[in-house]
Amino acid sequence: MHLRHISIRNFRGLRGLQLRLRRDTTVLIGENQWGRTSLARALEAVLGASDRRLTDADRTSGTQGPVEIALDIGESQPGEFDCCPALASLPCTIFGHRVVRLRLNHHDGAAVPTILNTNGDALPLDESTAQAAHDALRQQIPVIRLSLWNGTSRTDERLIPDAAWTSAMNAWMAPDREGPPSRQALLHSAEAATRELSDRRLRDAASLDLAAELRALPSAWRHAERQPANADRVCAMLIAAHALLKADRRGAGEGVRPILLVEDPETHLHPTLLSNLWSLVEQLPAQRLVTTNAPDFLGAIDLRAIRRLVRRPDRTVAHGVKSKDLSESDVRRLSYHIRTLRGGAFFARAWILVEGETEFWSLPGAASLLGHDLDAEGVRVVEFAQAGLESVLRLAGSLAMPVHALVDGDAAGRGYADVIHRHDAIAPCRLTVLPANSIERYFWDRGLDGAILESAYGAEAGNGRSPGRAIDDAIRRHTKPGLARRLLDVMAADPERLVPKELGDVVASAISLARQSMRA
């Protein structure tokens, strides 16, 4: 079974949210206070341990309506509901798939579960039947928070105690430790995890593979004279094993498929350890919901798994790439050129789309000379030429990312402008066409010809050379980023006069878009 969809109203920082999840991994990104943690807590309240319940304190401040959380749970394999008596007879089919629709409504100090039909109306079932279905879902798809806390400073009394595991993690993540934890401590914890994994009732292939890896560690390290290089791998396996053990201790039966909540894993883990952990977590028989602020981590995630949360006055909206938005070819290009090379762009509030390297280097520098900090404003410059403008625009549209595009005035630039004019976006999409065939020629025409000539031929350069030839020679001598930096150095002498107006207008427009996205 897996969670298909969650709807939340009036819960903590979420006045309203509709979120569709993938069967395997869904990654949430968004500004602070935009509801990522509230979403995780809502799932824990509905499908977490039995002591996690909705309370009056969960109601969003300033609202009067009840707290309401609704889940759509579907079969991962046909017939799964038939193996669970409390779910087998519940009649709901959506687009040919069997679904259990559970709504938990908290009002006047009590939380009442209701089972809904296809149209979202309550089925005429007695309360005990609805409660039995809710209890069954807690058992079949338990929510487990993958805890990466620093045990030296705080422990959570609700966590299942595991002295060996806790000891190893404290040794690993203690802020004042010198060097990695001892091999003995790691092996002791690994052996304890192996014994428990070997005895657990949920004998899925992933947990058996994990137990086999842990069991093999002592012999692999027996003759090591120094701390082994795979200590990160060991710690990652221990964390993954602990998640499985917590799921089993919830009393889960055969066929359980937990939902793993992984909140900002980069906060506690070095990228190497995080990479090792994620390679294991992906193999576990679980649905994963991850929150992150790390561009590097995002680079390892399927583009279609990303959900960008945007807060509005009355609700939080989740934007993501739908299968119809991008082709497989689009996804491959964007995954490399945007997600991998420019992963930080997903955390921006607005994009400036540019054709090439000169614009990429020039715009942040020009903004700085004019007294603006694009990073602080949440504006990212994104090159679109390698990924394709249409693909990048569709991605921006899927994420509701405001954009301002800057294109050259040549034939290719006019073609890009036509694409932008045809683009149907749910967020603003502005356009500036430079009054020149290239940005280098634009700089030449705006009074920086002397700087380009000097870059190409040195301080003794004369004025008898054509712009095109001089620009080509300057680029050949310094590369496009190098020429951009030299021109910025010249502009720094008198920014108000030497920074071209069109660049200043693009910067101001993008900052305006970013600020509007925060107020919307």
Image: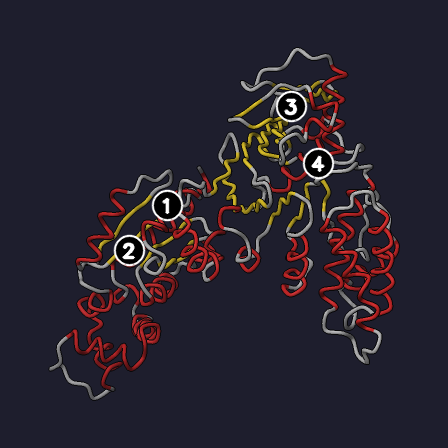
Kindly indicate the quadrant of the structure image that contains residue 382.
bottom left
Looking at this view, is 449 or 340 the one in front?
340
**Where is mark 1, residue-wise?**
394
- The secondary element bearing badge 3 is classed as strand
Looking at this view, is 117 or 166 the one in front?
117
Q: In whole angstroms, how far apart are the C-alphas of marks 4 and 2?
A: 48 Å
Classify residue 103 as left or right of residue 466.
right
**Where is mark 3, residue-wise?**
103
For the point 62% across and 44% down, the residue is: 289
**Where is mark 4, residue-wise?**
141
> Mark 4: which amino acid?
Ile
Q: In whole angstroms, how far apart are the C-alphas of marks 2 and 1?
A: 17 Å
Numbered disc in front, either 2 or 3: 3
**Where is mark 2, residue-wise?**
406
- Position of residue 372 measured from the top left corner of the image (x, y, whole percent): 40, 58
Q: Is residue 123 visible?
A: yes
> Mark 2: which amino acid?
Leu
Residue 417, above or below 325: below
Numbered disc in front, either 3 or 4: 4
Classify residue 334 as left or right of residue 385.
right
Q: Is residue 61 visible?
A: no
Could you tell me if the residues under marks 4 and 1 are in contact, i.e. CB atoms within 8 Å? no
As drawn, the residue found furthest toward the front would be: 79
Name the N-terminal-most of marks 3 and 1.
3
Q: Quadrant of the C terminus?
A: top left
> Mark 1: which amino acid?
Arg
- The secondary element bearing badge 2 is classed as strand
